[in-house]
Image (cartoon, rainbow, N blue to C red):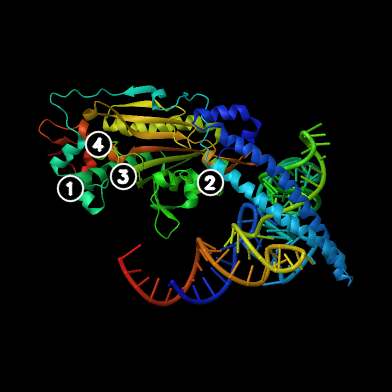
Amino acid sequence: MLDIKYLLENREEAKEQLASRKIGPALAEKIFLEYEEKCRTQKEADDLRNRRNTISKEIGAKKSKGENADELMAEVAGIKTRMETVEAREKELDASIRDTLLRIPNLPRPDVPVGQDESANKEVSRWGEPRKFDFTPRAHHDIGETLGILDFERGAKIAGHGYILYRGAGALLERALINFMLDTHTSDGYQEHFVPFVVSEESLIGTGQLPKFKDEMMYQIENENLFLNPTAEVPLTNIYRDEIIDEDKLPIKVTAYAPSFRREAGSYGKDTKGLIRVHQFNKVELVKFARPEDSEAEQQSMLAQAEKVLRLLELPYRIIVLSTGDMGFSAAKCYDIEVWLPSQNGYKEISSVSNCTDFQARRANIRFRRAETKKSEFVHTLNGSGLAVGRTMVAVLENYQTKDGGVKIPAVLVPYMRGLSEIK
RNA sequence: GGAAAGGUGUCUGAGUGGUCGAAAGAGCACGCUUGGAAGGCGUGUGUGCCCCAGAAGGGUACCGCGGGUUCGAAUCCCGCCCUUUCCGCCA
């Protein structure tokens, strides 16, 4: 959620920034208008309440002395009639302003490239050399099915399209990747968590998935105010919802493995085959809570943390900084890591590392107490995939495939594979 | 799922219709005391919003959340959420 004061005090600048995020000026104008009326309405309501409170005290005083208070009671009755109308309008305006604010995305940091979509994204760096094949590399779903380690048909039989059954060495490899990633992050100071796989509406509002993306993204549980976890960013960030953290505890670094569930409504036709775009995928998530002045640097180190996994797996990748039009709702600045996929002869997103500044903290009411001033301020929250496990599996299968249809296991994973060094 | 108890400020905890933003204590800040520290003493110590050009100041709201009763609600009533204990059911 944006700071309404910032919007009010920087109206034109804010509208420009919103335009870069594909939000027209109408929403901001609506807030300005409603805010103005809200101030007038609140003033009237406050004055009426003041009068009522004063009279009520007088009534109390009179009655305790046994005097007659009928006249005062008649006056207060008149006030109450008017109060009903004014207070109702006040509530309506407050709710409307809040609802609008909840649907406005975060504003970009000044160094984010401005643009409407991914064409304005900028490549930042590359690591690793894509392997030269002396045969035509196959796609991961082809490799996986042939080896019998990925079963798309039976996954679909069990749950439908987009739900995958992993078998044997495939199941083991998925688990190996999860454990390898968690071990890597925890040894670098991220505290491991195991989180609920369902999340409440409040939590989702806190991180920004609701109210705006309910239908496209979320699976809701029938008869419950619960949703399947769409990303461990939600449970991890909400750990500190409605809390005040001591400044000397910051930055807090947490990590968790969790399956992510996405409806992916509206993405029909994209990546329909294989593991790339599915309704349930595993992910190891990184989340940080930091002081505002540190969040920039913390984002860089989180990016490096996610990169580390790919470097250890020796998978080539590049880093992209997303443009204002391509960033996620809650992000003020976002890097994508894209891994090399031989079958696509190109790079594919495998991680997203976002600085959400105080946007989520304001929604979720996550603050810290500044030691010097004793005042509470909103923290900055950051999140990043470290990494999307399913897509890492894709990258391993494709980059490590052999001419005869097998897959070599990256050296760092062998200990996690009970010594298995190749799937054949 | 059933029964009971309970949710108050940074924390502990009092408060069952009026003068309660809320006792007391702890913590924290400042000052005094001391050669210094400990200790003691004193003072202060929430947040949002609105009015005000701003400071000062004022108003209003906030005692889990939402409604209701009342001239007046932390206090009474209803619904919901959460916590604890016991029972049931299970992994």
Residue under label 3, please give it.
A281
The kind of residue tagged 3 is Phe
Left or right, A398 with respect to B86, comes to left
Q: Is residue A60 visible?
A: yes
Q: What residue type is labelled 2?
A: Ala
Q: Do the residues labelled 1 and 4 touch (CB within 8 Å)?
A: no
Q: Which residue: 31% across, 39% down?
A: A268
Q: Distance between the residues labelled 3 and 2?
A: 26 Å
* C-alpha separation, residue under disc 4 versus residue under disc 3: 12 Å
- Across and down, in percent, residue B59 comes to 78, 50
Q: In this view, does B61 lie to the left or right of A65?
A: left
**Residue depth check, mark 1 versus mark 3: number of the one nearer the observer:** 3
Confirm whether residue A366 shows in the render: no
Q: In front here: B65 or A52? A: A52
Q: Mark 2 points at which residue?
A: A364
Q: Residue A394 carries which label?
A: 4
Nearer-N-terminus badge (1/4): 1
Chain for disc number 1? A
Q: Give the chain letter at badge 2.
A: A
Give the amino acid at mark 4: Val
| Badge 1 and badge 3 both on one subunit | yes
Residue hosting label 1:
A168
Crowd tier of the residue under label 4, counting other residues whose Cα lies within 10 Å: few below 14, some 14–19, many 20 or above: many
Q: Is mark 1 on a helix, strand or loop?
A: loop
Determine crowd level at label 2: few under 14, some 14-19, many 20+ residues with C-alpha closer than 10 A: many
Q: Hey, what amino acid is under mark 1?
A: Gly
Mark 1 → mark 4, Cα distance in angstroms: 16 Å
Q: Nearer the viewer, residue A264 or A133?
A: A264
